[in-house]
Amino acid sequence: MRVLAIETSCDETGVAILEGSSFADSFSFTVLGEALLSQAELHRDYGGVYPTLAKREHEKNLPTILAEALKKAGMKEPADVDAIIVTSGPGLEPALWTGITFAQDLAKKWKKPLFASNHMEGHFVASLVQDGLLSGISFPILALLVSGGHSEFIRVDDWFRYSIVGQTLDDAVGECFDKVARMLGLQYPGGPEISRLAKHARDSDLPQSTAALPRPMIHTDNCDISFSGLKTAALYALRDMGGIETLSENDKAAFAREFEDSVAEVFVHKARRALVETGASMFALGGGVAANKHLREVLADTITKDFPDVEIRVPDPSLTGDNAVMIAQAALLHFLIGDWKLDRPHADIKANGNLSLEPSDI
């Protein structure tokens, strides 16, 4: 089976054509053609994604990105595509609507069924796929989905059966990274910049930062997390240090390390509690912040040590950010297990910026 997926939930314009098949309890996904364009440079001056600009760029880029993906797939005609998939949420609604409208027009023109996909579900499925193969899955799974808009622990009892174990009570971790990066005078997107400085501090064995940041909610008896207090603490700590104008590059690097350590320690403690509560057989890390090497390493080290029977899955680094491949993979899985039928396309697709990862919403 082949699908064409469209992803425009934020500031990446993505189109991918994938072929999927199933055998026994395994599923394979082959990327036939993919094209992805990031708008990060355009949003840098705003310190974050500017929705109206994102919408305009998606409108401009979608036809070109589609043509590129089709060319890579060696397709001139859409005859070999069985369905069109589009992200309907969560995300920035102006950006989502652009992709939905484009997909609706394409489905009408090509006379293909149209289905709506959940962006976070795409991140989850992509975290399990290894080299195009989805196999060896054991439920329940504990998924930690971390991105600019989401930070949540999800228990997965079977395909597309989700329940929230813990979630952020305020800011998502990716948003916190970006805002602290801005405090340090770093460019958007802030996450990679903080990680770069933190790595320099570790590799150079720099002294610990004079700022001691909190580890929010680390000892609470639940799996919820909070990052607004950490963001505020970072602001006050930088002020007490005399402001970034007085800091050397090594001072900034040490501060970035302290911040990244704080975030990682929170997730390690909460992941440990969530694994005990859920009795999960597998742990999956997904979302844009899953690209953070330090977070991946400390989670893997802790789980391997404390839960040796739990298998850890992380996505290929190229699939941690927003992309259409993960949207296609999730949709193909729906079809291959018989959850979606080609003769029952989704009707009245709407953009939903707050769409949650729950069975009733998929």
Image (cartoon, grey):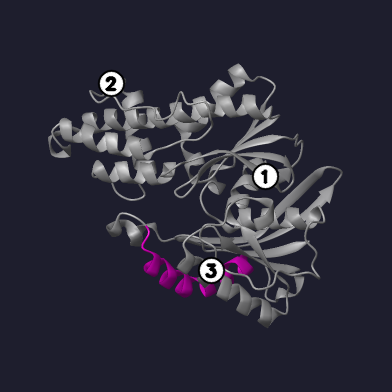
Q: Residue at x 39, y 46 (%)?
A: 175
Snapshot quadrant of residue 170: top left
Depth check: give the residue in front, 160 or 197: 160
Query: Which mark is first along the chain, 2 or 3?
Result: 3
Where does label 3 land, which residue? 65
Residue denoted by label 2: 208
Looking at the rendering, the stretch of residues picked out in magenta corresponds to 49-73
Does the magenta stretch mainly form a helix, a strand or a loop? Answer: helix
* SS for callout 1: strand
Position of residue 317 relative to residue 95, above or below, is above
Q: CA distance from mark 3 to mark 1?
A: 33 Å
Going by the image, does 157 lie left or right of 298? Answer: right
Residue drawn 64% across and 20% down?
307
Mark 1 = which residue? Answer: 162
Q: Please tell me whether mark 3 or mark 1 is closer to you in this view.
A: 1
Where's residue 329, x and y in %? 68, 53
Q: Badge 3: how crowded within 10 Å, few (<14), some, or many (20+)?
A: many
- Label 2 vs 1, first from the N-terminus: 1
